[in-house]
Image (cartoon, rainbow, N blue to C red):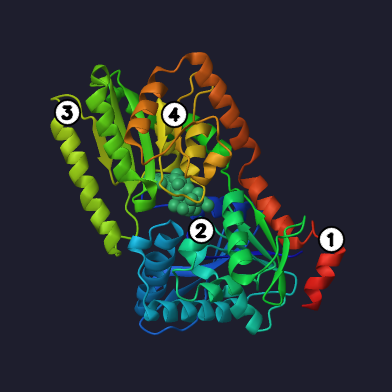
Amino acid sequence: MSRLIVVSNRVSLPRDTGGGSVGGLAAALGAALREHHGVWFGWSGETTPQYTGQIAMERIGDVTLARVDLEPVDVDEYYNGYANKTLWPLFHDRIDLTAYERSFDAGYARVNARFAEALAALIGPDDLIWVHDYHLAPLARELRALGVKNRIGFFLHIPWPARQLLVTLPGHRKLVEALFHYDVVGFQTQDNLSAFTGYLSKEIGVGTPDDHGMVAAFGRRTRLGAFPIGIKADDFSDGALSQGGQESFARMQESMAGRRMIVGVDRLDYSKGLEERFLAYEQFLATQEAQREKVFMLEIATLSRDAVEAYQDLRGRLDAIAGRVNGAYGTMDWVPLRYVNTGYRQDELAGIYRAAAVGLVTPLRDGMNLVAKEYVASQDPEDPGVLILSRFAGAAAQMGSALIVNPYDRDEVSGAIQRALTMGYAERRRRWEKLMDNVVTEDIVAWRESFVDALKGEVRTPAARLANDAA
Ligand code: GDG
């Protein structure tokens, strides 16, 4: 039987206990791997003075973890540098925050080459290899150079930027060319896929993909597709009713003292629109006097990438806005904005989501946004809350029954909060049912199966396969 080898920057199964920042990628892959008896390869998160390429193998349940340590300079140049100071901001439309240094580029190439060398030793002839995210775009090219002939797929969890932005990146062509060493390249949404094919057409002169998503460029053929990631819905619908979920629900209810809660849950990241969200909520408090003391907002923002200056700056600004809002509007027994950097267990989160009348998910740009789906899955079907969702989250393409907002428009977001809080029961339920239907149908299993099927080449025409083998 062919194994599935998943490769991502960090290898860390989502913890059931304790807080910390559990990214969407870790949450999604943990579920997929457990169902597939997979091997998960990547960085351990640890550093070593001198790179050894030694792989630490560990078996957890049905999943084998294979981890390598990196040198501190790798972490600076590859992870904090090229991945998080160059690609992340650029791919989230923040060219103002995008830093480009040659050393970052060199570190990115070096770590991808090292990963390929270590990984090649683990690959069996029938294994399928599934590479995740922007940290590892060049990995297939490096593996091919080592003679690896297996089918290799790449899934991008973050948006693909518009061509006009991508061309500001020195070496953009090399980055795109590297993707053609994969058999399948997957994006979150059709819009992201169109941005990619738009680049191919304008910059490389390549035609549109055929009906199977096959496109030829740089002397190779690759299948392109949109594979919107989902969640394991019952982790949240059942999680909210588990002991931990019920306890956190009850604890929230008690502390709410009859008030209604608006909830936000995010990694502390400028792409998530936290600053704009706080300002919109401030506007809501300023304009909806009758709602004061009747509602509060809980923002759970777990710290992330705090070695990067832009994240430290954002944290400072959020602290200031939260302090100002609470100073201006708070009373002796009402804190209008509860802002915490603590992480919670997943079952606790489910209970918190369920206790919230409004889920406020307003990223400025987001590949998908799993929190929107988790909020919906955690609701009480008899008394569901209302989801407010940014049009710039990938999830908006599937979740049109949410209140869709422009996160840059404070008046609109403030108005949507008021509308959500005053929405009649029938509409609230109708909207939630449609959202829940999508969350359950297009779930994590559907995502994994559709990508893995594409990776196996099952939906490709014989002609396309022959052409690729010949390349
Ligand atoms: C990337 C893309 C895409 C947050 N705080 C806690 C906690 N979380 C979990 C949430 C959710 C995850 O983290 C965040 O997922 P997102 O999808 O919102 O965002 P990113 O981390 O930026 O993920 C994103 C995703 O990849 C998947 O493809 O959707 O667009 O940027 O699952 O629940 N989990 C726990 N405690 C917390 O305090 N347990």
Location of residue 457 in the rendering, given as x and y in whole percent from the top left corner: 77, 62
Q: Earlier in the sequence, mark 4 or mark 3?
A: 3
Q: Earlier in the sequence, mark 2 or mark 3?
A: 2
According to the image, label 1 marks what residue? Answer: 461
The span from disc 2 to disc 1 (Cα, nearest Å) is 30 Å
**Which residue occupies 64% across, 84% down?**
146
Choose mark 2 or mark 4, whichever is in front. 2
The span from disc 3 to disc 1 (Cα, nearest Å) is 63 Å
Q: Is the C-beta separation of discs 4 and 1 under 8 Å?
A: no
Choose mark 4 or mark 1, whichever is in front. 1
Q: Amino acid at mark 1?
A: Thr
According to the image, label 4 marks what residue? Answer: 354
The span from disc 2 to disc 4 (Cα, nearest Å) is 37 Å
Q: Amino acid at mark 2?
A: Ala
Q: Earlier in the sequence, mark 4 or mark 1?
A: 4
Q: Is the C-beta separation of discs 4 and 3 under 8 Å?
A: no
According to the image, label 3 marks what residue? Answer: 330
According to the image, label 2 marks what residue? Answer: 162
